[in-house]
């Protein structure tokens, strides 16, 4: 009776691996794996552009 | 990497893969492991724990003994578990089939306890050790479990389980009042019953005892 | 906070996604205010509580009579209370706070339905409180990383369900075309954690598996809490803050993709390395060892990304508190993970298993990596959601140096002591009591390291409370750092 479980486990494993491989193939066909530079700069914008540091220790305020 | 469903699928598959492999496959492989029936002795091993030992297991659990003590003997040649006398053989999965909660443990601040029932079969030793580990093991860093004991007036006869403390210790700690005794509470009795039940001293086809060549003067 | 009807609208699959413009950063930050503050303050409280239990446990190990008469503080319970307070109290609360803010920022949309998150915070913290009290009272399950008694866990589930609903809505109504790398890690972490926790609860507590299958479930669960919940959130933060603070895009975005997927596949299987030599099938142990070694791939890849982004800008560490903490964390991520891969090798494991080495390693991961990255995140996030500046730079510096030195001392000390302990334990000629005696100096030093870390935590707490109480400077629309930042040297 055990062979039923083992067959099932094998089929599930194959299904999972197969889906994963297909997903990778689908990604490459649909442009998911291109244009990485746009991704890297997506966290910057006009307010906080590339080249500007956005953090600093607090400077003590002078009483004015 | 811009499609939500795609990322979700990958994430799901990653976890499904490991769950299938680590959990499901092993559950199939040995999740229904049964005790071994020994023809010669006419009984099954391992022994089912007694009711008192099972209550003791709960005390072990609630006091967190597992965080200093492991309960698994590694195979000879991998570490010195058998050489230290912590077991005759490596622990195998079948040893744990009756355990409602398995306490393999991951720290050996204290010694492995898998076979403590065989190594130290004296209940009195265990009571003393639990009351104040310094009594039996000077220099130990184990916590004292005085709250598992009661110091009360003797009623009728002295309890057979009363602890016999060394005279100077008793004097130093005010435990030498005449007509008084130090006894374990039911929790302590259960815990010690549990500890004494920890002995994998039988063999299975998959695990034969190992006879170590003990070097001269080896300690436990 | 949105009303119930708008929540219904968000949940309705028919509602079209917003096609409006991206929100201003300051708007996003303002919308995240309440959830972040509630989770942050809860996290802070648990950090202090967890630290108290840590010190108590540490002292008890070298001075067992310390508070020895109290049953509720016995080492087995105090240490467990510490672990649960810092894992489910501090680490998870702060993970939520940082994750929500990051998701709002990365979605470029105002944080909606903040009320859901605030309610979730209440349930989560109620659950953890009940859990920790339960542990001290003696209801611990003694399942590592799952010790909170079953009466606490339903509250955690309710909290997480609310978080899950919120996460799906936020992701659905995002206004970016691109899903940044941090977002993948956050979504993955938010998805993985409840599955891990649920399966562990079912297979260990409600319908316990038989025998050592329990151990496999336990360590699949516990190690994955580290690798699939805390690590992704820590990495998400590092991948956002290092480039953001520097104003420099991440070194190689392609490597981020590789790093993410290799982590997803390999980390899952590594948990079995806690059972090397144990009574489980040899093949699964070998698979765990193999996966632990394969982890070198995502770790090196992520390391290259983080560290090469920093190259040329190390001077910035002088100016940015966030960068200090996050880079410290990222460096330790690389180190601790490589150590972990090494520890999975059987000949190394023979020595380190069951020793203080593992404890040192665990703290390097959860503290020197994860907690430090979270500290850095708080230093960035809080001024922006409150529109106030940190009151004291000296407190920040005190915090940083105290915990940086403290945690480094901690893991170096325990790894050295643990290594020696392991070598001696494997020598049957050395009596066990002597092995224990030889660990004592290392246990003392650990307590000292812990005290140093406590000082840092106090500095942190004081700064936060001070900042919350301080009045916002008149006319401020953004923290001083957005406009007229002090001059920093060019990259």
Image (tube, coloured by chain):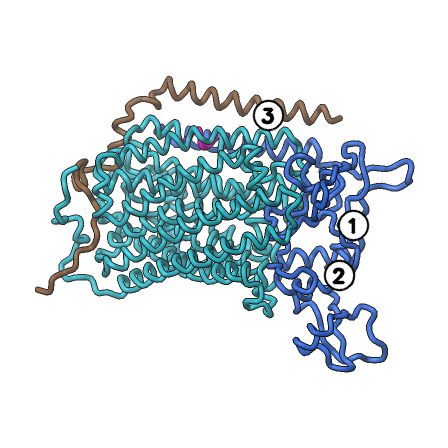
Residue drawn where x is 47% and y is 51% of the image: C87
Q: Main secondary structure of the magenta part?
A: helix
Q: Is residue C228 visible?
A: yes
Q: CA distance from mark 1 to mark 3?
A: 45 Å
Q: Nearer the viewer, residue C374 or B199?
A: B199
Q: Nearer the viewer, residue C113 or C3?
A: C113
Residue drawn where x is 21% and y is 52% of the image: A57
Chain at tag 2: B
Q: Against B62, is C164 above or below? A: above
The residue that mark 2 highlights is B125
Give coordinates of residue C364: x percent, y percent.
Answer: 43, 46
Q: Against C461, is C107 above or below? A: above
> Which stretch appears magenta?
C260-265
Q: CA distance from mark 3 to mark 2?
A: 54 Å
Which image quadrant: the N terminus of chain B? top left
- Residue C452 occupies quadrant: bottom left
Chain A's colour is brown
Chain B's colour is blue
Q: Which chain is cyan?
A: C
Nearer the observer: mark 1 or 3; the answer is 1
The residue that mark 1 highlights is B118
- How busy is the neighbourhood of tag 2: few (under 14 within 10 Å), some, or many (20 plus)? some
- SS of the residue under disc 2: helix
The residue that mark 3 highlights is A12
Chain at tag 3: A
């Amino acid at each position: 009776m055990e062979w039923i479980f083992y067959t099932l486990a094998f089929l599930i494993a194959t299904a999972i691996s197969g889906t994963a491989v297909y997903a990778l193939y689908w990604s490459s066909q649909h442009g998911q794996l291109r244009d990485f530079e746009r991704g890297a700069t997506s966290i910057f914008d006009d307010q906080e552009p590339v080249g500007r540091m956005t953090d600093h220790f607090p400077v003590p305020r002078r009483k004015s | 990497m811009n499609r939500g469903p795609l990322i979700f699928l990958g994430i799901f598959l990653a976890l499904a893969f490991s769950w299938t492999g680590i959990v499901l496959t092993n559950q199939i492989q040995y999740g229904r492991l049964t005790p071994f029936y020994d023809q010669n002795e006419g009984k099954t091993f391992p022994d089912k724990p007694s009711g008192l030992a099972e209550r003791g297991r709960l005390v072990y659990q609630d006091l967190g003994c597992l965080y200093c003590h492991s309960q698994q003997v590694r195979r000879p040649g991998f570490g010195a578990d058998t050489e230290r006398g912590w077991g005759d053989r490596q622990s195998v999965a079948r040893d744990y089939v009756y355990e409602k909660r398995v306490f393999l443990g991951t720290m050996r601040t204290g010694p492995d306890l898998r076979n403590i029932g065989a190594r130290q079969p004296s209940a009195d030793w265990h009571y003393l050790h639990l009351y104040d580990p310094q009594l039996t093991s000077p220099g130990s860093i184990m916590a004292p479990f005085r709250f598992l004991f009661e110091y009360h007036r003797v009623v009728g006869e002295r309890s057979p389980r009363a602890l016999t403390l060394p005279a100077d210790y008793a004097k130093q700690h005010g435990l030498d009042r005449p007509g008084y005794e130090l006894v374990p509470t039911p929790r302590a009795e259960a815990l010690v019953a549990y500890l004494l039940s920890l002995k994998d001293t039988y063999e299975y086809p998959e695990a034969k005892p190992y006879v170590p060549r003990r070097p001269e003067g080896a300690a436990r | 906070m949105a009303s119930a009807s708008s929540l219904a609208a968000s949940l309705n699959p028919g509602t079209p996604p917003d096609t409006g413009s991206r929100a201003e950063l300051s708007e996003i930050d303002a919308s995240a205010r309440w959830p972040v503050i509630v989770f942050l303050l809860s996290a802070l409280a648990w950090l202090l509580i967890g630290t108290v239990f840590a010190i108590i446990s540490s002292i008890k190990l070298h001075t067992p009579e310390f508070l020895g008469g109290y049953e509720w503080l016995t080492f087995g319970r105090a240490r467990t209370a510490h672990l649960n307070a810092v894992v489910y109290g501090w680490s998870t609360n702060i993970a939520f706070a940082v994750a929500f803010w990051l998701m709002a920022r990365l979605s470029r949309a105002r944080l909606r339905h903040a009320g859901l998150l605030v309610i979730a915070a209440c349930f989560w913290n109620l659950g953890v409180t009940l859990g920790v009290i339960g542990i001290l009272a003696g209801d611990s399950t003694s399942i590592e990383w799952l010790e909170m008694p079953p009466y606490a866990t339903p509250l955690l589930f309710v909290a997480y369900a609310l978080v899950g609903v919120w996460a799906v809505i936020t992701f659905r109504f995002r206004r970016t075309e691109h899903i940044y790398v941090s977002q993948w890690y956050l979504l993955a972490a938010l998805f993985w954690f409840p599955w891990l926790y649920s399966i562990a609860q079912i297979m260990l507590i409600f319908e316990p598996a038989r025998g050592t299958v329990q151990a496999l479930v336990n360590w699949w669960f516990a190690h994955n809490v580290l690798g699939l919940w805390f690590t992704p959130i820590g990495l998400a933060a590092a991948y956002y803050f290092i480039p953001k603070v520097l104003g420099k895009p991440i070194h190689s975005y392609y490597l981020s993709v590789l790093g993410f997927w290799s982590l997803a596949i390999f980390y899952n299987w590594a948990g079995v390395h806690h059972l090397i030599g144990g009574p489980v099938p040899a093949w699964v142990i070998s698979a765990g060892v193999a996966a632990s070694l394969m982890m070198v791939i995502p770790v090196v890849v992520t390391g290259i990304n983080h560290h090469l982004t920093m190259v040329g800008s190390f001077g910035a560490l002088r100016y940015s508190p966030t960068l200090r903490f996050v880079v410290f964390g990222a460096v330790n991520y690389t180190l601790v993970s490589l150590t972990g891969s090494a520890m999975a090798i059987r000949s190394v494991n023979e020595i380190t298993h069951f020793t203080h080495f593992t404890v040192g390693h665990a703290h390097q991961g959860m503290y020197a990596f994860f907690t430090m990255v979270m500290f850095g995140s708080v230093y960035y996030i809080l001024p922006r959601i409150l529109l106030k500046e940190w009151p004291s730079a000296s407190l920040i510096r005190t915090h940083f140096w105290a915990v940086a030195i403290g945690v480094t001392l901690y893991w170096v000390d325990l790894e050295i002591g643990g290594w020696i302990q392991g070598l001696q334990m494997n020598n049957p000629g050395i009596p066990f009591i002597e092995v224990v005696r030889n660990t004592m100096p290392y246990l003392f030093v650990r307590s000292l390291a812990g005290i140093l870390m406590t000082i840092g935590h106090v500095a942190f707490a004081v700064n936060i409370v001070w900042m919350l109480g301080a009045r916002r400077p008149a006319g401020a629309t953004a923290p001083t750092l957005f406009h007229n930042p002090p001059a920093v040297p060019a990259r």
